[in-house]
Amino acid sequence: MKKIINEPHAVVDELLEGMLLAHSDFLTGITDTRVVIEKEKRATVGLVSGGGSGHEPAHAGFVGDGMLRAAVLGEMFTSPTPDQIFEAIKASDTGHGVLLIVKNYTGDVMNFDMAKEMAEMEDIAVESVLVDDDIAVEDSTYTAGKRGVAGTVLVHKILGHYAREGKTLTELKELGERLTAHIDTLGVALTGATVPEVGKPGFTLAENEMEYGVGIHGEPGYRRSELKQSRAIANELVTKLMETKTDTKKIGLLVNGLGATPLQELYVFYRDVVHELKNYDVEIVFQKIGDFMTSIDMAGLSLTVIDLDSDTYQAALTSPVDVLNW
Amino acid sequence: MKKIINEPHAVVDELLEGMLLAHSDFLTGITDTRVVIEKEKRATVGLVSGGGSGHEPAHAGFVGDGMLRAAVLGEMFTSPTPDQIFEAIKASDTGHGVLLIVKNYTGDVMNFDMAKEMAEMEDIAVESVLVDDDIAVEDSTYTAGKRGVAGTVLVHKILGHYAREGKTLTELKELGERLTAHIDTLGVALTGATVPEVGKPGFTLAENEMEYGVGIHGEPGYRRSELKQSRAIANELVTKLMETKTDTKKIGLLVNGLGATPLQELYVFYRDVVHELKNYDVEIVFQKIGDFMTSIDMAGLSLTVIDLDSDTYQAALTSPVDVLNW
Amino acid sequence: MELTHEQAKRWLLNFHQKVTDNKAYLSELDQAIGDGDHGSNMARGTEAVKDKLGSVTEDSLEAVLKQAAMALISKVGGASGPLYGSAFMAMAKTAKETSELSTLIEAGLDGIKHRGKADVGDKTMIDMWQPVTSALHEDDLTEVTIDQALEDVKPLKAKKGRASYVGERSMGALDPGAVSSGYLFTALIEEVLA
Amino acid sequence: MELTHEQAKRWLLNFHQKVTDNKAYLSELDQAIGDGDHGSNMARGTEAVKDKLGSVTEDSLEAVLKQAAMALISKVGGASGPLYGSAFMAMAKTAKETSELSTLIEAGLDGIKHRGKADVGDKTMIDMWQPVTSALHEDDLTEVTIDQALEDVKPLKAKKGRASYVGERSMGALDPGAVSSGYLFTALIEEVLA
Ligand SMILES: Nc1ncnc2c1ncn2[C@@H]1O[C@H](COP(=O)(O)OP(=O)(O)O)[C@@H](O)[C@H]1O
Ligand SMILES: Nc1ncnc2c1ncn2[C@@H]1O[C@H](COP(=O)(O)OP(=O)(O)O)[C@@H](O)[C@H]1O
Ligand SMILES: [Mg+2]
Ligand SMILES: [Mg+2]
Ligand SMILES: [Mg+2]
Ligand SMILES: [Mg+2]
């Protein structure tokens, strides 16, 4: 394991400390709990998200005006606990309620649910939106359902925009539920991710091997294959992602690096995605390329397609925000 | 070599194509040459930078209002040619002249110089500023001098600000020359970088080895050592960087990932840098953390310290810009 | 049979010991079909339980169970945190009415089912809690019950939690949560039933 | 001795062939003390020279040398591009006045020195161009001159260009630019002096 860190168990606390030291102009922490929150709060619904650490810049990099009010950091790749989330909820409420944006993982769902129950006992209005964009997993009663991955960041952005516009908690929840149905993601990995305390990659791929459909904690994908060229990967991901979008005319794209992928590869891949999409009758009206929802030091990327036939989503995606990593 | 690319020799053209496809709202290319340039040009001095590819987001990610007017992309790790740079100069001139920001590498210096001569033959006013911030190299008559590395991005930002404010070419050159003396950088590598066409890392480090002082093309550093903890690395880099800054009271910091370094490590390291700086009588008034000047897929980082006793630099660093990766 | 607050404390301390001793093994089991953190998660959690128990001054079963619940909820995270936490919270609530052991454990089981929306046969800790609850109702909980439950959980295909992502590959493997729950009930046998 | 435009063409084509044949070797030399691209750089450049020569219709030495310069300048990049480019540009300018070979090569050498601010002994291509120029002045350029120059460049410590970063480590190694320039002059011997 080659990492620039100190004691492996201290990484989460130290990266949090680094963040707060660097960005104290607009971000602050909540004492004794790993929460990053805006200093200035508008009198609007507060959006709270979070999950295990290791997905940086998610989620703390999206805290700020126009996106999240607070982010809750769990242990590495481990959902945060209900009391942490509860602290974030309390601190985020300005009397307009709090919307939780939760990635669909058993742990996240349950911990956020418990936090919601705690908050309700203190009469704070809380709703939640579940993001399950990873189409690598079949959504059936035989699985925990589709996972929440990079598309979550688009949910932060769009709902963050609406929250700033003054939408109510109920409106935001409804909007969110409709929105998540329009977002699909697929990832590929060239290497596994190494959790510092574990010290070795969660899985290993041979020098000439890649895996399609891997989750952001290294959950198994749907196929291993020899390493393909960018255009072949673009073909496979686009084909799968566009399968359900037969009536869609306008889309947005998010090409997301998983932590150790150079930006140059993301741009080569983006190019191939655009070429691939020429086979479809769609217009690309929004795109974002970079690291948004990583998997520690995994090499690989994910492609997210969002259906943008609704003009309002597009406007919500492009409005200015004041966060670190959008 | 594990990369999401197509034919190795096509990476530069394809990443450029990807960039221009993605950001055609404000960026465009110059036909038949690898130049990225702003679509809307203010009537001010145009700043042009560039160098070998492989340092993404440098330099194209800094083209836009308030920073560069154009970026010239060479082959991977190879300086662009004079005619490419000349095209960028011609397209960047609005009658106010063009300032070249050049990293101190023999190839870059000579190619930019030749381009400057070509432009002068066409009566375009051109000046250049040479950035040589890498203190790993001794500045003596026995070397090609200190190399230009991540600090270059701060030069883009500060001079970009002044150019937008309407400073003249002569003023900008003078400002630039004074400015570069205030910027120092040191990098560490955990792995070598793999140029796609070469197919293997430029150098190799053992599983428990790191190298201090490596350049952004994998130029040899000043010492190999066993892999150290973040705080030990922070101690060494800060000590060396602060050596010449005994009278400095205010500084800015740039923690720059080299391409395959997770953001979480950059924040842990930033934290340790801040702690280390408590031993000095300085105030950190500016900081930037992320990937700015990478070395393809190298794991490692660099730390840049800029002396900010002059208040104007600080204002120039924080003014808003409209570029992709600042 | 009734559970006293002293017994409950001893039970939880024994559980902590077993989890600590088998931390690496639990993570290894989780590595095979999950994400390899069940050992760390449970060690962190039971350590917190141990710490909290020291500060329980009330001589009440409810207080002991509630503190355990709070410790697990606030320190574990992941999937097992809210599940174990909900189990102990449900037991604490039930302890207001009764201290009858099988009723308490059944309440815990219901807490898990309610929280995780899983059921018997999904290859989760429920496949340990369910047979143990039945055995307690018949006053017949022994190591055999636990061993049998582990045997029975092996061939199942995971349908809930992280292990469900590996699908077929989960068949033949032990479920880490069922194993850690097995430690909980072995500790119960040793401290309460023996 | 005078250089004709036909000779110059043959010379450059021969140079292209030698560089192409030794592309990997040149990069290998550069890998040791530089960044490993000298072979690719020069192959790309001489390929462009070859292409350009096809389109030179004028029967003029100046035109041939100028086209070679332009091709090198616009296709090589790195350090060697402007250096070889400046050398041929200086030769082209000089060809307006004279076609005397040693005067032309000396002009090329001056072009390199002017562009790169290096001098004899810095372990660069200059350490090939300088002895070759002297030999030409004495009408005595042979393979021996080139071999000797390569021998002499080896022990030097690099003071210019990328190789200067490896300092002491450059001692004992060949300089890739000196070697590629050696090919240039071997080609000259074969096509013009033989
Ligand atoms: N929905 C569920 N209901 C009951 N138990 C579950 C459920 N999901 C997961 N589990 C249990 O949780 C265990 C995994 O816990 P742990 O590894 O600590 O959390 P995570 O899966 O978040 O990493 C599984 O072995 C299983 O017994
Ligand atoms: N300042 C200089 N003057 C003369 N020749 C130089 C100078 N700097 C470098 N060279 C020559 O250039 C060669 C390296 O060329 P190349 O590898 O193509 O470029 P780069 O160093 O940019 O990768 C060296 O071997 C040396 O002969
Ligand atoms: Mg986990
Ligand atoms: Mg080079
Ligand atoms: Mg687990
Ligand atoms: Mg080279």
Image (cartoon, coloured by chain):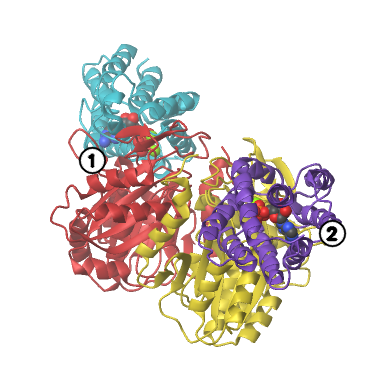
Chain colours: A red, B yellow, C cyan, D purple
Task: Work out whether residue D190 or residue B213 is closer to the camera in this orientation and state it.
Answer: D190
Amino acid type assigned to the residue bearing label 2 in the image: His
Q: Is residue B244 above or below residue D20?
A: below
Which label is found at residue D137?
Answer: 2
Q: Chain of mark 1?
A: A
Left-right relation of A235 to D158:
left
Left-right relation of B69 to A230:
right
Q: Point out the residue furthest to the left here.
A: A247
- Residue A206: image location, x then y, percent: 45, 30
- Residue C16: image location, x then y, percent: 45, 29
Which label is found at residue A215?
Answer: none
What residue is shown with label 1? A145
* Crowd around label 2: few <14 · some 14–19 · many ≥20 (10 Å): some
Q: Secondary structure at mark 1?
A: loop
- Residue C7: image location, x then y, percent: 39, 26
Q: Quadrant of the C terminus of chain A?
A: bottom left
